[in-house]
Amino acid sequence: MIRPAELIHRKRDGAELSEVEISELVLAYARDEVPDYQLAAFCMAVYFRGLTPTETHALTDAMVRSGETIDLSPLGRKVVDKHSTGGVGDKASIVIGPVVAACGVPFAKMSGRGLGHTGGTLDKLESIPGFRIELSGDEFIRQVQEIGLAIVGQTADLVPADKKLYALRDVTATVDIDPLIASSIMSKKIAGGADAILLDVKVGDGAFMRTLNEARELARTMVELGRLAGREVVCELTDMDQPLGRAVGNALEIAEALDTLEGSGPPDLTELVLGASAHLLDLSDLGVDVDEGRRLAEEAVASGAARELYDRWVRAQDGDPARDALPRTPVVRPVPAHASGFVQAIATMDVGLAALHLGAGRTRKEDAIDHAVGVVCLAKRGDRVEAGQPLADVHARDEESAAGCVTEIEACYRIGDGEPERKPIVLDVLS
Ligand code: URA
């Protein structure tokens, strides 16, 4: 029997706990045998003292063992998955899935909902009329077998310890702690069953990781956790100092995902999608390298195969894949530039929050989302704008919320003289 108070005390004083102690603490918490207040104190001790690699591995392993795991071996193929640490306007999975599947590689993904200012793939998919995010384990495997692609919500039985712990961390200022983020993400990816995983670690103002060094540290931890679980992991570190693409808001992001699948998406999103797809094809059992993977991904978009696969996938999950079926708002208002010059910076987290205030995200877990509302950032970092020119369009339910959002978005844009340095979308790759 572990004594939680003693473990908290020792962690607070900087001691390393044994694998058994960590594991028992987490599993007892998942079984409701340790109260929230003790786990909250433990997480705060971890914030100040950290976890060693052995402790982080023990934590991840215990989280995986807290519930069911998915066995994808009946597919008889090497299955790939992709995960982003969360950002603003990140609809990449909705494009990457169909591209990779159109190249003949099975893609099986469990996604999450929006967290704070960041959007969630499930919320975006639910803006497609009829789209069903809940599939049984058998349906999930059958769909990957038949179509090559399924993106679903995490079932209640998969990593229940993370579900509980995440909700607790969210309200106790203990989300942004490297070993806790790494174990939270990797436990879900390991339990999800894929053999190879591409992680997109977002860096910048709109991400949980603010600096490249912090992101590298997190990426190294996750690659190592994957290796210890027998999974291949590649981490891309990508720019989140401005929204990805232009659209921020659920249905607007689906429309932009469709543009990208049709070859007319924004340059940064297109580049991220093709680069990530190339890595996933390299990780797959197709026997191609990254360069050939990139060529295949480009071809899947150019030939229309990726868009066709999207249609089949969405129909398989009971959704209507037509662009016209997406919900729209009655009000669209421009955000005029307050000065002429170059866009120097966009306060990315604030753009995410402005969209959330419009109704695109939640402030409480039980809040309903307005799938149609959001912001389209027409001007991106480095663009030249003239005073009065629209920087963005606000898609709102009514004039009052539109006016509030226009003011918020205007404040997100910093315009000045001199062209700022261009930054690539992919900042580094680790494996
Ligand atoms: N995403 C997760 O799934 N977990 C975290 O802790 C942070 C981001």
Image (tube, rainbow, N blue to C red):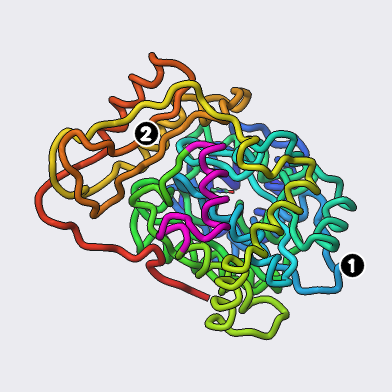
Q: Dots 1 and 2: beta carbons under 8 Å?
A: no
C-alpha separation, residue under disc 1 versus residue under disc 2 = 47 Å
Query: How busy is the neighbourhood of tag 1: few (under 14 within 10 Å), some, or many (20 plus)?
Result: few
Depth order, front residue of 427/160:
427
Name the side, left or right, on which 60 lies relative to 302. Answer: right
Name the residue rendered at 89%, 67% in the picture: 74
Picture coordinates of residue 328 (x, y %)? 54, 29
Q: Vertically, is 385 above or below 312? A: above
Residue 274 colored in magenta in the image? no
- 123 relative to 155 in the view: left or right: left
Q: Quadrant of residue 166?
A: top right
Across and down, in percent, residue 359 comes to 50, 25
Q: Is residue 97 left or right of residue 389?
A: right
- Between 235 and 417, which is closer to the camera in this rendering? 417
Q: Which residues are magenta?
A: 249-270
306 versus 407 height, above or below: below
> Does residue 239 appear to the left or right of 387 in the view shown?
right
Question: Helix, strand, or loop for circle 1?
Answer: helix
Question: Dot 2, crowdedness within 10 Å: few (<14), some or many (≥20)?
Answer: many
- Amino acid carrying label 1: it is Pro
Residue 95, image x, y percentages: 59, 56
- Name the kind of residue labelled 2 in the image: Asp
User: Which residue does the image show at 60% across and 45% down from the upper left?
Assistant: 121
User: Is 256 within the magenta?
Assistant: yes
Q: Nearer the viewer, mark 1 or mark 2?
A: 2
Q: Main secondary structure of the magenta part?
A: helix
Which residue is at 39% across, 47% downward?
243
Question: Measuring 45% from the left and 16% from the top, which residue is drawn there?
Answer: 398
Q: Which mark is residue 393?
A: 2
* Residue labelled with disc 1: 74
